[in-house]
Amino acid sequence: MKVIIVGGVAGGASCAARLRRLDEKAEILLLERGPYVSYANCGLPYHVGGTIEKEASLLVSTEQSFRVIFNIDCRTNNEVISISPDRKTVEIKNHLTGEVTSEKYDKLVLSPGAAPIRPPLPGIDLPGIFSVRTVPDARNIREWLDRDKDRSVGNSFTGVDTVSKPKRAVVVGGGFIGLEMAENFIHRGLQVTLIEKLDQVMPPLDPEMARIVKRYMKRHGIKVKVNDGVAGFRKTEDGSLEVLTESGKAYSSDIVVLAIGVRPETALAKMAGLEIGQRGGIRVDERMRTSNPDIYAVGDAIEVKDFVTGQWTLIPLAGPANRQGRIAADVIAGRDSRFRGTQGTSICKLFDAAIAQTGTSEKALRQLGDTDYEKIYLYPNSHAGYYPDAKLLIIKILFRKSNGLLLGAQVLGEEGVPKRIDSFAMAIQMGCTIYDLEEAELSYAPPYGSAKDPVNFAGMVAADVLHGDMPIMHWESVGDGFILDVRNPPEVTAESVPGAVNIPLPQMRERLGELPRDREIYVLCRSAQRAYYATRILLQNGFMARTLSGGMMSRSHSVSQTNS
């Protein structure tokens, strides 16, 4: 059996190595149009910033190692330019020699990835405007940043002008790559402006969580402009760039990085007559087979089912791509492996913090018209509060009102985020409920967590909601309701809610007569813990009461607040 694999990064490389481990006799040809195979493109922003200093550190494997260790015919700088499914052949162009050859296959695996979106805007091909996808991309950016001061260069306005070391950067796009590049430009000492066409950074997050990220970016010196798309670029008389936006603004820069997003590379799939899904990716089944039984596809170019919602989706993440490559190899080797779908588990470093999410989001559920869900916000410490340097975690979880099934989680913080998001991710993968989170036995020592881990705590709070012990209300639904603030007077003086009645929690029982029995009472405190205690007192004394989920802390980033 001869298997040709198109694309030598992530899914393709994983497929090739796995197939060799399963079948020593198979003839495997791995083709990569670029100069490297199996490189860590997720590390490119950190190479630009200097955290990963050596370019060689990004190379997970090499063409030579595939040949020597796996006995795989691995060819870099070789691009598949056409596919003939009827003849089961591919045409390959060697970019070093220009030679075009043909190879037959029994099984074909497509792992072409996704290309950075580069819209046909005026001036987009000017020098100094980069995308970040490959090792050469990162190398070119570093060389541009490291160029010597006062180097004379040609200029279309004056013939010759003097170019100084870059001091200003504009990043276009507020997703993972955009945030990582913005941070690394700050580390390089540049003034950074990030422009995002949508009304929030980090599109996978819900808007109120994204606002926290935006504020954090601002505190670290990044100028963030949302709700404004880029309209074009132009070169100024001093040799610098200007980024022009749809609102009519212009931002001066010495370097621009496009991080608008990626688009599945489907040219070969279309050439082969394969089915393309409504999201624009190659449509595959759970065994990674395309509409042609002898052609498989994996990685960023394919559409897969969302594990939580069951909807077709595009999730360009390295983890799923590697698993898909293994599954394709298993199936080709005769095993009954299946891809369960993806839940989009991801994490992004941003200075000292981490931004993580798994499962579905509230906005995705709303788009589907799904109303069988509830959400809670909580703000626990990353580890035991009595142990030094505990950090605040900001957690939002989504779960079914009908049965408590965990649907999604978003976690922000400066410590302990990976541990929690991975716990939530595994819980979703195993079909756990919030009641399972209550009972999860997680590791505890004061430097690492609490006896009631934030994951347990999330389950307990959610269970209280579903049991009716803590009916909740969210800020966007309060309207002109009666608000009871149970914080202490100094806290209220520092930050208050207009119209709220303040009765500190220790005085609640003796002052119940001051509260209405014919209106629902919305109870708040700083993070909702004291409000919960007050809600229990009120409910058991015949009042109608709900806890404002997340208290004043969730109000600070509520969807009812301005997008500051």
Image (cartoon, helix red, strand yellow):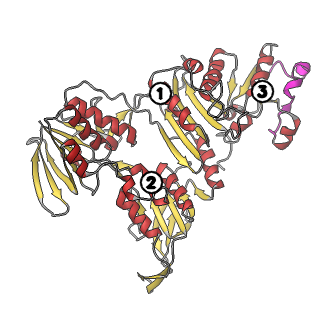
Task: Indicate the amino acid at tag 1.
Answer: Met
Residue numbers of the magenta segment:
496-521
Mark 3 to mark 1 CA distance (whole Å): 31 Å
Task: Indicate the amino acid at tag 2.
Answer: Ile
Rendered image: mark on residue 426: 1
| Residue linked to disc 2 | 260
**Location of residue 304 in the rendering, given as x and y in whole percent from the top left corner:** 35, 34
Describe the element under mark 3 as helix, strand or loop: helix
Describe the element under mark 2 as helix, strand or loop: loop
Q: Is residue 507 magenta?
A: yes
Describe the element under mark 1 as helix, strand or loop: helix
Residue 386 visible in the snapshot: yes
Label 2–label 3 contact, CB within 8 A = no
**Location of residue 314 in the rendering, given as x and y in whole percent from the top left corner:** 38, 40
Q: Is residue 513 left or right of residue 367?
A: right
Q: Earlier in the sequence, mark 3 or mark 1?
A: 1
Rendered image: mark on residue 530: 3
